[in-house]
Structure formats: structure tokens, C-alpha cells
Image: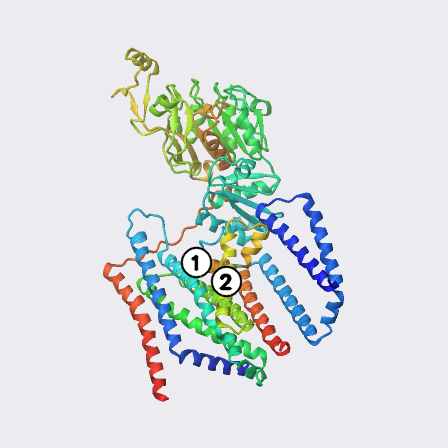
Amino acid sequence: MKKSFVIINKELKSYFLSPIAYLVLTFFLLISGFVFYIVLAEAVKNLTLNPYFNEPINVPSLIISTFGGFVGTLFLFLGPLITMGVYADERKKKTLELLLTSPIRDGELILGKYFSGLIFILILLLASYLNVLILFYVSKPDLLPTLGAFLGLILFAASLVSLGNFVSSLTENQIVAAIITFILFLILWFFDIFTRESTTGWRGVLGYLSPLKHLQTLQRGVINLYDIVYFLSFISFFLFLTYRSIESLKWRS
Amino acid sequence: MNKGRLGLILIAASLVVIAGISIFYSIKKMWFDYFSYIYIGAGAIFLIGLILNFDNIVEYFKTRRGIYSLNSVVSILLFLGILVLVNYLAFYHNKSLDLTPNKINSLSPKTKKVLKNLKGEIKAIAFYKKVDDKLRSMLEKYRDTSPKFQYEIVDPDKYPDVAKMYNVKYYNTIVITNGKKNELVDSVDEAKITAAIIKVTSNRVKKVYFLLGHGEKSIKDKNVTGYSEIAKLLKENNFKVDEFSILDKQKIPDDCTVLVIGGPKEKLFDKEIKIIEDYYRKGGSILLLVDPMEKYRCGDLLKFWGLRPENLFVVDVNGLFFGGQLGIVLVKNYPKSVITSGMSGKVSIFPLVVPLKTGEKGKFEYEKFLETSPFPGSFGVKDINSYLREMNSQGGKIRFRKGLDVPGPFAFGYVVKSKDKKNGRGRFIVITSAGFITNTFIKDNLNSDIFLNSVNYLAQDESLISISPRKPEDKRIYLTASGIMTIFYVSVVLIPLLFFIIGVVVVVRRRRLK
């Protein structure tokens, strides 16, 4: 396992010593900050200052879930860009062979690569949640549901990274990896949207397969055992596929 | 063509056929008998293809590559199988944790118990034009609590046949069904949905008895003034229906869930009144329909609940206009109550009503759910004969006579709740218009819904009525315009800038180090 940390260290260094990471971060925070501001301003205008709105409403939690949903959508676009190069780039530069013949075991390599991508996306997530801290300053949001929603986003991002890693291991072309990851995740995303109207039969199964459905439950402030199991299964399945795919490189060539 | 290639073509062709039929079925939802034969045929061709390729397959798996890929595929399938199993177990033995302080994502303990004891599958079919957030989150709560609960949201305009199958007449109706029995629910309300689930699943049949013996309207009477249609409607809603006379049995039948007293024409005996009151005290449910056409207006019965019929003839301007008869009352706006929630704007019609006065408050609480329009929409006339004479002499125009007539509105439907169990543990509803559910009046309006809602309310389990919707804690954010501007600067300028500066510092320092 120690060697995984070596990989993580090396990968994160290469992320954070290049200007691109900071440009991505700045860009991401600019968009999410702007959305946060819009959501907050609208909520204050329409829900708090509207004298006709008498129903009890939890404005901070509404803002947090809307913001969380948006950050999740943003990940859908950003995730593939972060993971596209993980293996594809190394394969193209022929450095992956070096890694594979080094004394690092395949599993360690895969976990190291996986967690470095995940840590990078978590830094993005944490930075964007600075906005939510502001919310704690101007109002009293409920802490537990906020943490639950945050956990949802972490698991969601972790799933996205594991799928992205797998796709990246299949090709030498980064752009192809990014596009395929995006399309696959988009399809899974739409599984939820197309099956919202029914839980019966195959539509129930398709809906269950969509990460969006499970993310939404966590965003509502509910933790279901099966939501957690789903995300962990999703992550481990694609890590396992990555493992098999990297392993196959040895005997396929 | 060699054997192997022919085999590949056969495999490909059979797969195309199978996929084609599957896609057709999933989109069109139609399955023809011959599909099954084609399916089997395609499966056979697939097998033949495999057999033709048998040698090649065996050859492939003899190579190192073949062994490894077989190993890979098998291990992936195995892993996937385990994951499917784990997810299946997690879904069917789900534990749920609601993090919100008011538990707005949770169902009441009563509902949870009902769902836990479900034996078969229950399906909710919601007939909504648009997928409503409130509806979906409510159905999701049920779904998350029990995997035996399924739901479907159907647009009744797109599938009118499905709506017709379940007897759905209005938008935003939810049908609860177990495949055999159906129950209609008219709003996204936990108490109502759970009550419907109980009703669909329980074998105990709820029985509605209609009182006889004093000229009440009969459920066997198929004439315009009879109750035969409403009895049919009750049966459709999973109630048993019967008639009885207290004089025969000297008591209310033991299996009586709701007692309907449908417009008695003659005074009840004191002994009968006492039996009815006792029935109420011990927890019985009563729906009293007073007939304003008669002299006897159940004053002696109503006294127990502190209510008094007023001797007024109600003139409703809209009722006269639409009904063509003096005395017809048209209701479009309903006071907020358990019976008429969600009915606002829809019309119900009452042929003659008697205004009700509530007595001293203290023992009972009164929730009015039917009321005539506010003045000048309705007013009460003390002596109808002299009013009619005057009206006819003035060319048939209706007119409010100041000083003589009483301005509306008048309440004529009450849910009476006892404040103290000592006053009685039952439930009581009164509507002073026995004619409103006769065979002529229940068509094309809300009358039957008002009646059914009343009976459903009276027949409900005690514990369900106490389920009230969970509401989020009221939290608002108060910010001035400058406060909002500050947030703009922090969120959109400061935070991104901070990371940008860190980036510049790191990159510049690294360049210098080089």
C-alpha cells in the first residue's frame, strides 16, 4: 500500500505544479460561486421577502440542495477532463510499461492513480463548499443534512472518477477517453430522468442504475443503506475493470 | 463460405432479431404470440451458430490469450454477480436514516408499520399531467420504506384508457391497487394514502349501514329520490352496504363501521336516539343527513352535538341561476377541512339546505366544510310563502328584503370533534341536505366525492387521522442589498481569486527554482 502513496504523491505534484490545475480550479470556482450567488439572491428575493409566501420553508437547505445539484452537474463535465489522461497519456508516452514492469503491483498502481484523481476532485468540491460556509455565517442551515448532501457529492465524484479511470485505461487517446466517459455517465444520468415516472419492472432497475437517483436522495438529507452500497459497488466495479484492463495490457501485446 | 463464418453470420442475425423484438416490446408495450416463437427460433439459430464455430472457439481458448481473456471475463462476471447480490440484499433490507431535524423525509410510525406488514405488492398509480415534486418525494418515501411499494406516474390525457380502467375522473388522483382492489386518493396526503393501503390490503370489510324506519331514503330505491346509485358507489369503493331498523334489533349492528341516517321524515323515538348516542359515545361513526323538505329536521338528534337547525329558507343566487329552482344551493368555495381539501373551484349542488347554528362551545369542536356563498350571493328567508307571494307580484325577481331577510353565508356541513373522550369517542358529520346524494344529484359534480370523503373519514382508523403532514422548519435568510453584494464579492471574486493567486505563486516559484 505504501507504494500507492508514492503514486498519489507523484500524481498530485504533477497536478498542482502545473498552471492548468489552478486554471481549472479558478474557472470552476468562478462558475460555482456565480451560481451560488444567483441561487442565494433569488431565494432571498422570492422566498424571504415575498409577503405572500406563508408556508414554512427552509431556505438555507433549499439553497444547499440546489447548489449541490449544480456542482454535481458541473462534475459531469469536469470529471472526464480530469481522468482522461490517467492511463491514456501514459500509454501514449509509453511510460505505462515502465510502471508495469516496476516493482509496484498493479493493484497499488490502480488505487494510487484512482485516489490522486479523487483527491483532486475533492479539493475542487471542498473549495466550492466555501460558499456554503458563507451560508452558515448568514443563517442557520441544518448541519447534518448539509453533511449528508456533501457525502453524496463525494460518492458521486468518486464514481465518476472510477468510470473515467477505466475508460482511460482502454485507449491511448485522451480526447476519446474524455468523450466516452462523458457519454457513458450521461447515459447513466439519463437513466434516472427517463424512469422518474415509474418504479415498476425494467424502469425500476434502470433508475436504480443511475447515480443521479442516489445522489438526489442524499441531497434530500436521507441516507439509505442501498444508496451507499450502490456507490461503493459502482466504484469497486470500475476499479476492478480497470485492474483487469491494465492486467490485460501485459498479455495482449 | 466456411463453417465458422456462416456460424458468425447466424449468431449476428439471431442477436439482431432478439434485440429488435425486445426494443419493439419495450417501446410499444405490445407482445404478439408469434413473438415467442421467433424468440425461440432465434435462440436456436444462435446455438447452431455457436456449434458451427465450436472448433474455432475451442482453438481460441487453447491459446494463452484465450485462457487469459476467459479468465478475465469469468472473474468480471463473478464480481458483477456478487455486486448485484449485495445491492439486491441492501435494497430489500434497506435501513434509512433521515438527517433532517423535523424528519421531513420520513413517514409516520403508523405508516411504517403498515408498510412493514405488507404481504403482497402494492402499486400507486398517480394520474398527473406533470410530474409534481411534492408527489414524487412522497411516493419516494413510501418506496424507500418498503420495496413492495411500486409507483407509476401516468398522464391521464395520454392514457385515457388506463384512467378509465381505474375509474379516475379528475386530474391529480392517486390509485392505490394490489391488483384486485383499488382505492382512489385525491391528494398527496400521507394519512389518505396510508388509509387507502390499509383498505386495499385488509380483509376486514368496512360496512356502511343506512338507518330505516322513519321514512329515510333507501339504498334499494332506484327512483330519482333514492340512494341506489350512492350504494353502488360505496360498493365500488370496497365498502359493504346494508339497511337496518333499530326497532328490529334494539341496537346498532356490531359490524357497523359507519351509520348513515339519510333524511328521516318522522321523529325518532327517544329510545332510538339514546341508542344512537350510546353508539357514538362508545366510538361509533355517524353521518347524519337532514332533509330540509320535511318538517322534522332532526333537532332532537342534533341537540346532543350542540347543533341547531335554523328555520330559514336559503336562497342562493347562483343556485337559482344554474339550477333553475329557488332553494338550490351551488357551492364552489369550500372552507378548509379534511373533507373538502383540494376541491376548491369545483362545483357541488344541494337541493335545499338548512343553516346550522353551533351551540355553546366547550364539549365539541366544529369544523365546517360546506357553506353557502357570502352575501349577496345567498340569504335566508324566514317565511318562504310570503316571500314567494311578494316575488310573484313583483315579476318573479329575487330580492333581499332588508330587515326581514338574513344575509348569508350559512354553514350546512360540519365535522364535529369531541374535545374530551368523555363526551364520546366516535365521529360525527352532519350535512343538512339529504337530497344531495339522491340518484339525480350525484352525477357530474362533486356531490359523490363529498359523500365518499365523509364516509372515508368516518371509517378511518383513529391512528391515521392523527397523521399530519410534516413541515420543514421555517428558516429564512434576511439580507440587505449590500449584504447580497458582499456575498457576490466573496463568492464570485474573492474565492476564485484566492486560488488563482496560490496558483500564480506556486508556478512562479517553481519557474525560479529551475
Residue beneath the point at 73% across and 68% down: B56
- Residue A150 spot, x, y in % from top left: 44, 65
- Residue A160 spot, x, y in % from top left: 49, 67
Disc 2: host chain = A
Q: Nearer the viewer, residue A53 or B435?
A: A53
Query: Which of the image's four quarters has the C terminus of chain B?
Result: bottom left
Identify the amino acid type marked 1.
Thr
Q: Nearer the viewer, residue B455 or B437?
A: B437
How many C-alpha atoms fall within 10 Å of the one at disc 1: few (<14), some, or many (≥20)? Answer: many
Q: Say whether residue B117 is visible.
A: no
Per the image, label 1 sits on a secondary structure element best described as loop
Q: Nearer the viewer, residue B80 or B167?
A: B80
Query: Which of the image's four quarters has the N terminus of chain B?
Result: bottom right
Circle 2 sits on which residue?
A183
Q: Among all residues in the image, which is located at the extreme bottom?
A: B514
**In the displayed structure image, the side of residue B99 where residue A46 appears, left or right:** left
Number of the label disc, if any, that sits on residue B100 = 1
Identify the amino acid type marked 2.
Ile
Quick check: do tags 1 and 2 share a chain? no
How many C-alpha atoms fall within 10 Å of the one at disc 2: few (<14), some, or many (≥20)? Answer: some
Q: Say whether residue A99 is visible.
A: yes
Position above or below: A85 against B35: below
Residue beneath the point at 46% across and 74% down: A119
- Residue A2 spot, x, y in % from top left: 53, 83
Per the image, label 2 sits on a secondary structure element best described as helix
Which quarter of the picture shows residue A249? bottom right
Residue beneath the point at 59% across and 71% down: A240
- The answer for how far apart the CA atoms under marks 1 and 2 are is 34 Å
Disc 1: host chain = B
Q: Among all residues in the image, which is located at the extreme front?
A: B1
